[in-house]
Image: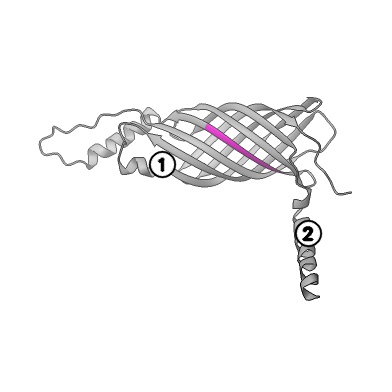
Amino acid sequence: MLLLVWPALARAQDTSFFQRLGLDRLQFVSLGAGVGRVSPSQVEPAQIYALSTDYGELARNWHIVFDVSFWESRYTDAAVAQFVDSLRKSIVDPTNDYSVLASQVQVYDVTFSGGVRWQSAAAVAVRPFGGLGIATHVINAEGRLIKGTFVERALDNLSTGFFANAGILFRPWGRVAVETQARADVLSGFRSLQVRAGALYLFGPSRRER
């Protein structure tokens, strides 16, 4: 008898737990793609491409959102020159015939983000939103100047930080919407600002408790 009752109690507890968190209301609401400009610290501004998904309301007006983005660029000439100067100062060369030649250092970033977004539920075409969350950056750097060195290994890393964004969702008709947003990312030794715009396809309205 206990074996029959225990699974039912466990299911009831699990259901209650998910209901308390609001996870039982989550559903696939929209899929979007966007493009924009990103300005990372010590890196030349670059084009950024992104895909985003909305999994509906965790609580009234609060959505769970995920996105993945990609950009590629190079370190600024000033950043490379500063690195070369530091190398020259650390080299002891009695013959004075050793030289360090500066060259471009390419950098690539793939970012996986997840967070919460407050979005107005008013029945209007234009809806403001704002959000914050956690982002994991997969960063890769390469170039003749750093190839095979500990610097290349240090720059090739997986870093987690925080982001915040704000923007406007414009839904002029049917299931198609246009979104613009500004976003800031902060992680150890790295900052970036980006502005992007894109289009979304809405699969259906978020469910709410009655």
Magenta part of the protein: which range? 64-70
Farthest left residue in view = 95
> Disc 1 residue type?
Asp
Q: Confirm whether the magenta stretch covers residue 192.
A: no
Residue 191: percent from left, percent from top: 50, 39
The foreground one among 82 and 122 is 122
> Disc 2 residue type?
Thr
Left or right: residue 123 compared with residue 104: right
In the rendered structure, find residue 103 and report the number of the disc placed on it.
Answer: none
Left or right: residue 59 compared with residue 190: right
The foreground one among 118 and 143 is 143
Whether pointer 2 and pointer 1 mark residues with C-beta atoms closer than 8 Å, the reply is no
Q: Residue at x 28, y 39 (%)?
A: 86
SS category of the residue bearing label 2: helix
Lower sequence index among marks 2 and 1: 2
> In the displayed structure, would residue 174 be above or below residue 133?
above
Residue 136: percent from left, percent from top: 54, 44
Q: Residue at x 76, y 73 (%)?
A: 3
> In the displayed structure, would residue 14 be above or below residue 53?
below
Residue 151: percent from left, percent from top: 34, 41
Read off the residue under disc 1.
Answer: 156
Farthest bottom residue in view = 1
Q: Residue at x 50, y 27 (%)?
A: 46
Q: CA distance from mark 2 to mark 1?
A: 42 Å
Farthest top residue in view = 172
- Predominant secondary structure in magenta? strand
Residue 178: percent from left, percent from top: 72, 26
Read off the residue under disc 2.
Answer: 15
Few, some or many C-alpha atoms within 10 Å of disc 1 (few <14, some 14-19, many ≥20)?
some
